[in-house]
Every structure is written in structure tokens, then in C-alpha cells.
Image (tube, rainbow, N blue to C red):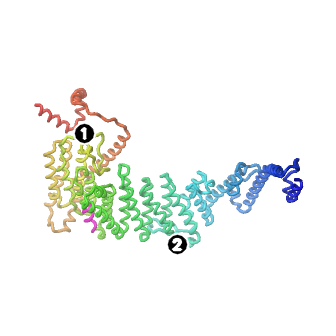
């Protein structure tokens, strides 16, 4: 054993020999014991190694700070003014965690607190310098920092420790506020003149080619940031910045396509402000690069619209209407492209309708009688109304009207009256804006003929039926009093709206005659005072407008065949106004306020957990009526009063 020990000592270097120690008192032990003892003795100097390593690191960082003074005197001066603690670094400061696993330290070492603080201070100094005098190097450094910060939003970035919440927010806020101005100044772009619509593209700058890579990195980071944010206010702020950066995206096709995809997502699913800002950016890009982006953007926007109008409620309806109006505006940018899209999608709607008519199955009916189909019909009515007059799109008016009328006639039962009313409203919109006569009144007057409004409802309802957000009524709805109340109200609104679109027509008296006859017949048959009151008022307004138009026609000195004179006469009447148009403008304001109150009232009612009210027997009703006589007199319904009268006559 002694000889073995001697051989091993001969193999040791001087340093290893010094570290091995001289206190061994079992030199004559066996090899196993000797080996074990040597391992134990080798562990003792470890704390000394760690201490030396710490002191070496501290000295190394002091050397880095000394080098910083000579290499970057401006930044060193900035640290002296703003962070003396960082410069006065002590050897005793802890640089590494003593409990860190040795194996992990070999493969991955987190930077020290000093390195992180230096990075943050350096970043803020560069941002401060960029505000004063932007240079290509400063923009490159800040762009790389911005890219690294955005990468941390995924949660798997190695640079996560460099960007605490406050640093991340400060960097993003700085870029949103100052990067656009800094890039413009660095590229020496001229500020657009007031009222100038043409964008100044940054690719026109002689410095563009040299800095293109850094700018590409930055605008790609903005798109990535948009896709990772969830808070509406922050998304809105980044979208405003993206709108500023549109000229840069127009020079970078790949990044522009990624931005468009993100914008369409926010346009179709975001909060109200986010949707508006996303649309403004979409419109801006497509207006300046129609030939490249418009066709694909319209296709993606239409798909997003259809996808997000599957369910309709009081909360989602305003967003769907917003998408309709903005998408119609996008289609108005190029009528040739719009015709191709409209032709394909209207034909697609017609094919669904044809299959439903021919096959007559529940599945095919459901492919037509759903919210997506109805909202698509309404969208194309709005598109054709917005772009009118257009020789390109005018041929699509007739097939679209035929599809809507076919949709009404597909299942003409009372349960689908709400869907019928939606279709009539779409026809009215189309007729009013395209100066095209579409016979919509027969579908409304048919309801007055078929429905028995005198029949007492089978049950009372707590809240009214909101026809704006339903397509189909349940069997329970058909028995409720709210169904007939809402139906009469809807008929009043739609008949008035349709006649308002034709109020200045020279043929108004002839157009209104069938409706006048039908309303008079309804008033003779109907015994419910509330319904009669509304329809009588409508009849009076229609007759008043007929008298006015007839009086004006008698003074005309031209024949009906003189189309030019007729158009001029109708234009003059529209400028002066008719009794019906004046009444409609006042009624419309009041009606919109009522609808808002109904919607808000419905939301409040849904929050209440109201108990079910059980019907009382007739004897209890009489007793309660005597006890609370004044209350019942003020709240009684007209049809209930008629019912009591008929019962009294029968008992006699």
C-alpha cells in the first residue's frame, strides 16, 4: 500500500500535491480505504475554490466598469449622474447563488444582477439618446431589444430575466410613442403636407436599403406583439402605432401580409375601439395597394364576417352591423373586384335556396333559415346600396331580390315571421338606396290577413320578445301576449319605413291603395283597442301623404311618359318634404330611444331571478280585484276588458 501511495504521489502535479494535504495517518491502510480517504480530503478545499471564484468575478466586473469608462464615456457619465450605486460595486457583493447546482452551472449560467442592471441602464440610455439624435446604430440596438422583449411574451425566451414588467412596458411604450418619428428623422423623410393623401414611402429614402433589415425586424415585432396582447386598451395603442407604420409595411410585402391577417382578426373579434382602429389600418393599406392586397383581404374579411355572425344577441348585433358597414365600404374601393365576389357569393346563396326548395328536408331548410344566411343577404343588400349607382353591380339587384323573396316563401308559417321581417327589412334597404321598386308590402299585409289578433293569448309573458335577435318563434312564444304585441309593432314599423322610401314618388297614391284597403279591413275585424290605435294612426299618415301627392300632381304640366320631368318633380318634392317624411323623421328618433331602453331593460331583467307566477282561480281574482280596484283599473289590458264584457253578456 505504501508503494502504491508513493506511485500516486509521483503522478500528482505540484498544485495537486499541495491541495492533497499532509495529515494522513493511515498510510498503511488498504487501497479501498485509501481511495475513500482521498475523496473525502478532496472535498475540503471546495469552499476555498468558490470564494476565489467569487472574488475573481468581482474583479472581472470592476475591470468591465473600468473598460466602460474608456470605451463608452457618454454612457459612463450617464451612470455617474443616475446610478452611482451601480458603479460603486464592492467585492463582497454576491454574484452567484451558492446553492446553484454544479451541473446546471456548466451548461446554463444566468447573468448576475450587475449585468442585468447594466443592460437595463444601457437600454434606457439608448432610448434617451434616440429621442435627441437618432442614428442607425441606436435604432439597431433598440430594435434588437424590442424583438427580444416581444419574444418573452411567449414565455419560452431565454431573455425573460432581462425584461421585468416595468422594463417591458417602458420599452414598448417608448417604441409606440417615439420610434416612428425617430425612423422618419433617421431616413430624412419629408413630413406630408396638409391635405396630402398620397403616402410618402420610406423606400424612397437613400438610407432605406442600409437600414431595411433593422426596420423589417421592428415591424415584424409589432405584428408579433399584436398577436400576443389581450387587454383592449393596450391593443388599441399598438394598433394606432401600426397605423402610423403603414408606409413601412407597404414596402415590406411579407410583413404586410402578416399585419393584414392580424388586423382582420381584430376587426372581426375585438372590442369596439379595437375593431375601428383595425378597419382604418386595413382600409389604408388596401387603398394604397389595391392591386396587390384588396382581392385577398376582401375574401378573408367576408369569411371572418360569416364566421362571427353565427350567433346574434343584443350584445353582438351592433358588432355585426359594424362589420356589415365597414365591409361594404371596403367593397366600394373597386367595383370590378366587388362584382366578382358578389356574383360568387350571391350565387352560392341561391344554390342553397334551390336545394332547400327541391329537396324539402329539414337539413336543407336549416342551411337557409339561419343567422349566417340572413346576415349575408343583408350584407349584399348593403353593399349594392352603398356602391349605387354602379353599372357594374346593377345586374346583381334582380337575382339578389329573387333570393330574398324565395327565402321568405320557403316556409311561410307563423313561427318564421321574425325571419320574414328581417328579409323585408333588407329589401326595404335595397329599394330605398337603389331607387328600385321591390314589392315588399304583400309579405307584411299577408300577416295581417292570416293572424287572428282577436284571439285571447294562452299565457302572459314577463318580458317582450325582441324580434331583432330571433329568427324563429317557439310554440310557447306563439301563445304569449308579447308575440302579438311585438308583431303589430313590427308591422307598423316596417310598413311605415317602406312607405317612407316611396313617399316622394309620383305614383304613391296608387302604390298605397292596396295597403289602405287592407288596413281598413283589419280595423273592422280587430277588437283589440291597442292594435287598432296603432294601425289607425298608420292609415291616417298614409292617406295624408296620398292627398298631398295627389294635390301636387294636379298642378303638374307634364305627362307621365316624360321621365326627365317626373324625376325633377320627385326631386323637388323630396327637398320640400311630405307629411309622411316629416312624421317619419320624428318617429325614427323616438323609436331608436325606445329600442335602446328595451335592450337595457331586458338586460336588467335577465339579471333578476324572478319567481314563477302561478295563476289564481277566478274567485280569488274577483276578491283581489275588489280589494285593489284602483290598481287593476290602471293596469288592465284592453283585451281583458273585452273578455269580461263578453262573459257578462253570456251570463245574462
Cα distance in 3D space between marks 2 and 1: 73 Å
Q: Which x, y percent locates residue 80?
A: 71, 54
- Judging by the rendered image, the residue that carries numbered circle 1 is 459
Q: Which residues are magenta?
A: 395-403
Q: Can residue 432 be seen here?
A: no
Instruction: Indicate the position of residue 112 as horizontal and vertical percent values.
Output: 69, 53
Pick whichever, 444 or 195, lies toward us: 444
Q: How many marks?
A: 2
Q: Position of residue 217 (x, y in %)?
A: 56, 64
Image quadrant occupied by the C terminus: top left
Residue 27 vertical placement versus 646 (above, below): below
Report the residue at 53% width, 63% height from top.
220
Residue at the disc numbered 2: 204
Which secondary structure type mostly characterizes the magenta part of the structure? helix
Asked if residue 644 lies left or right of residue 74, the reply is left
Query: Within the image, what quadrant is residue 104 found in?
Result: bottom right
Q: Relative to 223, is 537 above or below?
A: above
Does residue 58 appear to the left or right of 4 in the view shown?
Answer: left
Q: Quadrant of residue 154?
A: bottom right
Q: Callout 1 environment at 10 Å: few (<14), some (14 to 19), or many (20+)?
A: few
137 in magenta = no
Q: Compared to 598, does 167 lie above or below?
A: below
Q: Find out whether the residues at labels 2 and 1 contact each other: C-beta distance under 8 Å.
A: no
Q: Is residue 399 magenta?
A: yes
Q: Which of the marked residues, 2 or 1, is nearer the chain's N terminus?
A: 2
Q: Is residue 518 left or right of residue 33?
A: left
Amino acid at each position: 500500500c505504501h508503494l502504491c501511495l508513493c506511485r500516486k504521489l509521483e503522478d500528482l502535479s505540484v498544485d495537486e500535491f499541495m491541495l492533497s494535504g499532509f495529515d494522513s495517518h493511515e498510510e498503511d491502510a488498504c487501497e479501498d480505504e485509501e481511495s475513500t480517504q482521498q475523496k473525502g480530503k478532496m472535498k475540503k478545499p471546495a469552499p476555498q475554490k468558490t470564494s476565489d471564484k467569487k472574488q475573481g468575478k468581482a474583479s472581472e466586473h470592476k475591470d468591465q466598469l473600468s473598460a466602460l469608462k474608456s470605451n463608452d464615456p457618454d454612457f459612463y457619465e450617464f451612470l455617474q449622474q443616475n446610478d452611482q450605486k451601480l458603479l460603486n460595486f464592492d467585492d463582497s457583493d454576491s454574484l452567484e447563488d451558492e446553492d446553484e447546482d454544479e451541473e446546471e452551472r456548466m451548461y446554463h449560467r444566468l447573468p448576475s444582477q450587475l449585468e442585468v442592471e447594466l443592460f437595463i441602464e444601457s437600454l434606457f440610455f439608448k432610448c434617451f439618446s434616440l429621442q435627441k439624435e437618432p442614428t442607425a446604430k441606436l435604432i439597431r440596438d433598440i430594435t434588437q431589444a424590442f424583438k427580444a422583449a416581444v419574444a418573452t411574451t411567449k414565455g419560452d425566451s431565454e431573455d425573460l430575466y432581462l425584461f421585468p414588467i416595468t422594463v417591458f412596458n417602458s420599452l414598448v411604450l417608448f417604441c409606440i410613442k417615439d420610434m416612428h418619428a425617430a425612423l422618419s428623422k433617421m431616413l430624412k423623410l419629408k413630413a406630408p403636407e396638409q391635405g396630402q393623401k398620397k403616402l410618402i414611402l420610406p423606400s424612397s429614402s437613400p438610407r432605406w436599403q442600409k437600414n431595411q433589415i433593422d426596420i423589417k425586424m421592428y415591424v415584424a415585432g409589432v405584428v408579433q406583439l399584436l398577436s400576443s396582447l389581450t387587454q383592449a386598451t393596450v391593443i388599441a395603442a399598438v394598433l394606432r402605432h401600426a397605423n402610423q407604420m403603414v408606409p413601412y409595411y407597404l414596402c415590406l410585402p411579407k410583413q404586410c401580409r402578416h399585419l393584414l391577417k392580424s388586423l382582420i382578426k381584430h376587426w372581426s373579434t375585438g372590442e369596439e375601439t379595437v375593431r375601428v382602429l383595425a378597419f382604418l389600418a386595413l382600409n389604408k393599406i388596401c387603398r394604397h395597394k389595391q392591386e396587390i392586397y384588396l382581392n385577398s383581404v376582401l375574401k378573408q374579411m367576408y369569411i371572418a364576417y360569416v364566421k362571427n355572425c353565427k350567433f346574434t344577441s343584443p350584445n353582438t348585433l351592433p358588432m355585426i352591423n359594424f362589420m356589415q358597414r365597414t365591409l361594404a365600404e371596403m367593397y366600394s374601393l373597386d367595383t370590378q373586384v366587388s362584382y366578382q365576389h358578389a356574383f360568387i357569393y350571391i350565387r352560392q346563396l341561391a344554390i342553397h335556396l334551390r336545394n332547400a326548395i327541391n329537396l324539402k328536408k329539414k337539413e336543407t331548410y336549416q342551411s337557409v333559415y339561419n343567422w349566417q344566411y340572413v346576415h349575408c343577404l343583408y350584407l349584399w343588400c348593403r353593399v349594392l346600396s352603398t356602391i349605387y349607382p354602379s353599372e357594374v353591380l346593377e345586374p346583381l339587384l334582380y337575382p339578389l331580390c329573387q333570393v330574398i323573396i324565395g327565402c321568405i316563401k320557403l316556409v311561410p308559417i307563423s313561427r318564421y315571421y321574425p325571419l320574414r321581417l328581417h328579409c323585408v327589412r333588407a329589401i326595404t334597404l335595397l329599394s330605398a338606396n337603389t331607387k328600385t321598386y321591390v314589392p315588399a308590402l304583400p309579405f307584411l299585409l299577408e300577416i295581417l290577413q292570416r293572424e287572428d289578433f282577436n284571439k285571447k293569448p294562452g299565457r302572459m309573458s314577463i318580458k317582450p320578445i325582441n324580434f331583432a335577435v330571433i329568427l324563429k318563434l317557439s310554440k310557447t312564444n306563439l301563445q304569449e301576449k308579447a308575440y302579438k304585441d311585438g308583431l303589430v309593432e313590427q308591422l307598423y314599423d316596417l310598413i311605415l319605413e317602406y312607405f317612407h322610401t316611396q313617399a316622394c314618388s309620383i305614383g304613391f297614391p296608387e302604390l298605397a291603395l292596396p295597403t289602405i284597403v287592407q288596413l281598413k279591413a283589419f280595423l273592422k275585424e280587430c277588437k283589440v283597442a291597442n292594435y287598432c290605435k296603432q294601425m289607425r294612426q298608420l292609415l291616417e299618415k298614409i292617406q295624408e301623404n296620398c292627398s298631398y301627392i295627389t294635390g301636387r300632381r294636379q298642378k303638374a304640366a307634364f305627362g307621365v311618359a316624360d321621365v326627365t320631368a317626373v324625376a325633377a318633380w320627385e326631386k323637388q318634392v323630396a327637398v320640400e318634404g311630405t307629411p309622411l317624411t316629416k312624421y317619419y323623421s320624428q318617429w325614427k328618433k323616438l323609436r331608436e330611444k325606445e329600442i335602446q331602453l328595451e335592450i337595457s331593460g331586458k338586460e336588467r331583467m335577465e339579471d333578476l331571478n324572478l319567481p314563477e307566477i302561478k295563476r289564481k282561480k277566478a274567485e280569488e281574482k274577483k276578491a283581489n280585484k275588489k280589494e285593489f280596484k284602483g290598481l287593476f283599473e290602471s293596469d288592465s289590458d284592453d283585451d281583458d276588458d273585452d273578455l269580461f264584457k263578453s262573459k257578462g253578456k253570456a251570463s245574462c
